Amino acid sequence: KAGVTQTPRYLIKTRGQQVTLSCSPISGHRSVSWYQQTPGQGLQFLFEYFSETQRNKGNFPGRFSGRQFSNSRSEMNVSTLELGDSALYLCASSREGRREAFFGQGTRLTVV
Amino acid sequence: GENVEQHPSTLSVQEGDSAVIKCTYSDSASNYFPWYKQELGKGPQLIIDIRSNVGEKKDQRIAVTLNKTAKHFSLHITETQPEDSAVYFCAATPDNYGQNFVFGPGTRLSVLP
């Protein structure tokens, strides 16, 4: 059974640009959540989607947004990139009604 | 909101010894506590979890204990092996349905051969 797949694995962007990251959950999982991981702030919750609806949102500015498609795949978008947005962005999926969340390998975003 | 603290930040043990990592949480409504292991270049891997209605859970060499009164939970690894070397994160959430975990800052465990 395939795990959570995130694409691309690495990305380099320039300040001011925007970026879209993709996440394909484990087959059968309908909940997708996103986290930002940095050395200084650790793992921080961005948002969670379930059945194409945002169910929870963390404390991040409006430049960070996401969506989920009918096949449960999810994308997150960051607009007007700042140097501080450089981080590992992780996606996790879980089955409906289950608490266990499984992470992908992440997308390493570098903003220059 | 929830706040999770984790200690120690680094831990070195000899192969075969036990390792213990401790976490405290602030929100008494938190009811689910997973532990993740993250190796270099990989995403976090769920290794064990515990719910608030259980005091202890064990899976082979790994065990987790929960003290709801004191609001702390601990990870115990026995008979450590070099492949246990990684960064370990604890997390907590009061959300019954969501996956909005609050993570601790992590513990870097080194198992010396």
Image: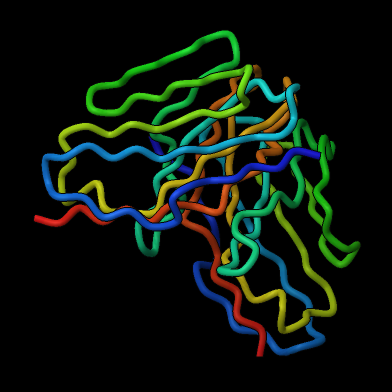
* Res B113 quadrant in image: bottom left
B28 lies above or below B99: above
Q: How are the colours assigned in the image?
A: rainbow
Q: Name the side, left or right, on which B34 lies relative to B26.
A: left
Which residue of the protein is positioned furthest toward the top in this rendering?
B53
User: Quarter holding the C terminus of chain A?
Assistant: bottom right
For this view, does B17 lie left or right of residue B84?
left
Residue B46 location (% of width, % of height): 44, 36
User: Residue A60, located in which quarter of the rendered image?
Assistant: bottom right
Q: Nearer the viewer, residue A80 or A52?
A: A80
Q: Nearer the viewer, residue B58 or A83?
A: B58
Total label count? 0
Name the image quarter holding the N terminus of chain A. top left
Tell me residue B58's x, y (percent): 33, 18
Residue B17: image location, x then y, percent: 16, 40
Closer-to-camera residue (A6/B73) = B73
Point out the residue furthest to the front here.
B70
Q: Quadrant of residue A57?
A: top right
Query: Is A22 on the left or on the right of B42, as rendered?
Result: right
Percent of width and height locating residue A26: 51, 36
Q: Residue at x 78, y 83 (%)?
A: A17
The residue shown at (73%, 73%) is A19
Please tell me which residue is depicted at 75% across the width and 30% down the height of the picture.
B27
Q: Is residue A27 left or right of residue A43?
A: left
Residue furthest to the right in view is A62
Please tell me whether residue A89 is drawn above or below residue B31 in the rendered image: below
Q: Residue at x 61, y 69 (%)?
A: A40
